Amino acid sequence: MEKLKIRNRLAKDKALLWAVCLLAALTAVPLFAILGEVFLRGYDQLSWSFFTEPTPTAYKAMKAIEAGEPIPGGIANGIVGTMLMLGMAAVVAIPVGILCGAFLAENPKSRFAQTVSYLTDLLQGTPSVIIGIVVYIWVVVPMKGYSAIAGSVALFIMMLPLIIRSTEETLKILPTSLKEAGLALGGNRARVMLKVQLPAAFGGIFTGVLLAISRVIGETAPLMFTALGCSFIRFAVDKPISAVPLLIWEFFNDPNLQELIWGASLFLLLFVLTLNLLSKYLAKKWNQ
């Protein structure tokens, strides 16, 4: 009787293992299908000119298609705009997010910290299109024009809650003896946080920053309301500027440029994949 029960348990355990493996495989099918489709359609478009030349006009693309030639130009204007807006957003979001996360980790029971924590969760769940509309009212309308500044503000708002949460959770898992040792040596709470706790949590915080960047780099809706787009390479932060997600949307709406969708999408996927792999590597190394 006892042997029969053991057999039944082993059979159930094996069946559950196979069911989990099957469901995991089914979950991965759409991911690999998307990656395979984008790679097969976009890899032959990747070239030096694709990364260094701006988007071609619809007329040039139409002439190239009629002549049976590859569409000239590339996505350099989108790459420059994306990096410019991401850089400006990160310069503000990283220090603000880290300091706010440190405050929440140190004062979890204060009323003000609980309010900030609630607002952070609320902001993290806000649809990106709503953020774009709000930034349009706050920045675009007062500046009387679309700009890279407005786009970076939208990205900053989207990055902020992710950095705050990653910083807070990373600091919470640090051993309390680390903080106690710093205080015992005569340091005040602010000095111990800046000189001891934050450096010790650098790996987890940096991973959170990379994940925040990979989360916002593909956003299109807020940039449609703030940056608008531009057909040439531009470094002016007070003028309309392009971004890779905006280019993908523009390519989709122009029949002459639709072939460029795949190359731009592949670049975006590879960039996000690189950031995610880097964050996983840093998290693993930090845990060791």
Image (cartoon, rainbow, N blue to C red):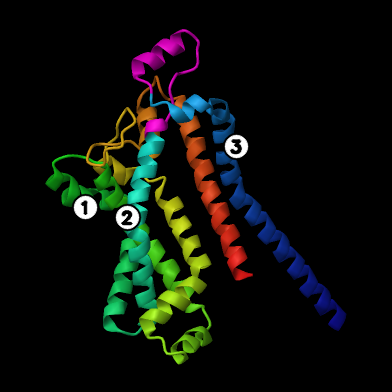
Could you say where residue 222 lies in the image, as x and y percent from the top left?
Answer: 30, 46
Q: Which residue is mark 3?
A: 36
Range covered by the magenta-colored residues: 56-77
Identity, as a three-letter code, of the amino acid under mark 1? Val
Q: Is residue 269 magenta?
A: no
Q: Which residue is mark 1?
A: 134
Picture layout, residue 179 above or below residue 10: below
Q: How many tags in the picture?
A: 3
The residue lying at 51 percent from left, 84 percent from top is 178
Mark 1 vs mark 3, foreground winner is 1
Q: Secondary structure at mark 3?
A: helix
Q: Nearer the viewer, residue 134 or 9?
A: 134
Query: Residue at 12% across / 47% down in the picture?
Result: 142
State the residue position of label 2.
156
- Quadrant that contains the C terminus: bottom right
Task: Say which label, 2 or 1, has the lower sequence index.
Answer: 1
